[in-house]
């Protein structure tokens, strides 16, 4: 799913914690009340719904049903939806029946911000401490479902609050069917999207990728390629986090360099950033059978989601 470059390594994921009153307030340290309130409960339920399908691995029934549901949820929230179905070839020669799901809000606007999360799961728990479990697929509660859940709750809010700019949401497929040592084996769906625009001539002005944004005790230092590609965009997002009261979770420090979906957009010359929980190496549940609902913390979903919403709809001063 993700590979880390050389010695620039930090990490990801966490454990479950119950939501507190502080988690549901957007300003835990007395910040201004938000114009739009992100619901951690709603986001958490979206994670549960995805996990209930089973591992969303391409070529499986769980994957097909989850893809149908994602498209229907975006439509339910008022997005203009296009589905990009394709057959991709994985590094091991497997033909993947994959699908990108794309929804647009405020489609008449010229300037467009693209929000991205991958919705597929790792087909093997190859990092599991138990060798007998390493051929099993991963539930992907944090690694996949958490980012999707934040964007689904964002879609719900966009449906009732008109953004000033055009906002598009992309649930990208086939991100996690990769192998160590082969950078090109990851993010196949994102690469296909960039090379084959779902709308003719489509070109977002900037891209924000969310990945592993639901773990307990999460930290989101500045991802290296994001800082190189789009320092102004990254700075605005971190300023929104600080203004929302989450500076401790979004420290103004350089993290590692991560191979993720955002690189496909950067290679195409589009400013893109990756918001990813990345510490001293990925969390023990990453790419293991332990990436279940026990990894998910409403407080982390709230912090990331409210920051994104405040980025889109700045609070009143």
Image (cartoon, grey):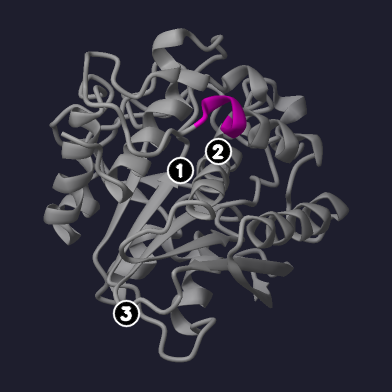
Res 80 label = none
* Picture coordinates of residue 49, whole percent (x, y): 74, 37
**Which labelled disc corresponds to residue 211?**
1
Q: What residue is shown at x 73% (from left), y 48% (from top)?
A: 56
Mark 1 lies on a secondary structure that is strand
In the image, farthest residue toward the bottom: 200
Residue 282 visible, this angle: yes
Q: Which residues are magenta?
A: 39-43
Viewer-side residue, 35 vs 268 = 35
**Tags 2 and 1 touching, CB below 8 Å:** yes
For the stretch drawn in magenta, the main secondary structure is helix
Image quadrant assignment for residue 77: bottom right
Which residue in the structure is indicated by mark 3?
110
Can residue 127 be seen from the camera position used here?
no
Front-lying residue, 3 or 45: 45
Tag 2 residue = 143
Q: Residue at x 56, y 22 (%)?
A: 296
Q: Residues within 10 Å of mark 2 (few under 14, many from 20)?
A: many
Residue 59 position, x and y percent, is 80, 61
Q: Residue at x 69, y 21 (%)?
A: 130
- Nearest the viewer among 135 and 254 is 254
Q: Nearer the viewer, mark 3 or mark 1?
A: 3
* Distance Cα–Cα, label 3 vs label 2: 32 Å
């Amino acid at each position: 799913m993700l590979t880390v470059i050389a010695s620039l390594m930090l990490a990801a994921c966490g454990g479950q914690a119950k939501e507190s009153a502080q988690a549901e307030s957007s300003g835990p340290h007395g910040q201004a009340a938000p114009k739009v309130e992100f619901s951690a409960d709603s986001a958490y339920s979206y994670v549960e719904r995805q996990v209930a399908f089973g591992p969303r691995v391409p070529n499986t029934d769980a994957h097909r049903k989850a893809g149908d549901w994602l498209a229907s949820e975006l439509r339910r929230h008022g997005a203009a939806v296009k589905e990009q179905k394709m057959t991709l070839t994985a590094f091991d020669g497997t033909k993947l029946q994959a699908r990108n799901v794309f929804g647009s809000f405020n489609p008449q606007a010229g300037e467009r911000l693209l929000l991205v999360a991958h919705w597929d799961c790792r087909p093997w728990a190859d990092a599991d401490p138990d060798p007998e479990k390493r051929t099993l697929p991963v539930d992907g509660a944090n690694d996949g479902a958490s980012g999707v859940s934040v964007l689904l709750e964002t879609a719900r809010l966009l449906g009732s609050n008109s953004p000033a700019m055009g906002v598009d949401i992309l649930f990208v497929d086939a991100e996690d069917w990769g192998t160590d040592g082969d950078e090109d084996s990851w993010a196949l769906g994102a690469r296909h999207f960039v090379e084959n625009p779902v709308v003719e001539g489509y070109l977002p002005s900037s891209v924000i990728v969310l990945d592993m944004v639901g773990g307990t005790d999460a930290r989101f230092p500045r991802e290296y390629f994001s800082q190189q590609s789009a320092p102004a965009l990254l700075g605005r997002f971190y300023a929104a986090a600080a203004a929302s009261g989450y500076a401790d979770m979004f420290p103004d420090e350089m993290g590692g360099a991560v191979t993720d979906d955002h690189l496909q957009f950067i290679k195409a010359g589009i400013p893109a950033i990756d918001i990813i929980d990345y510490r001293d190496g990925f969390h023990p549940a990453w790419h293991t059978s332990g990436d279940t609902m026990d990894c998910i913390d409403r407080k982390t979903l709230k912090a990331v989601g409210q920051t994104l919403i405040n980025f889109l709809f700045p609070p009143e001063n």
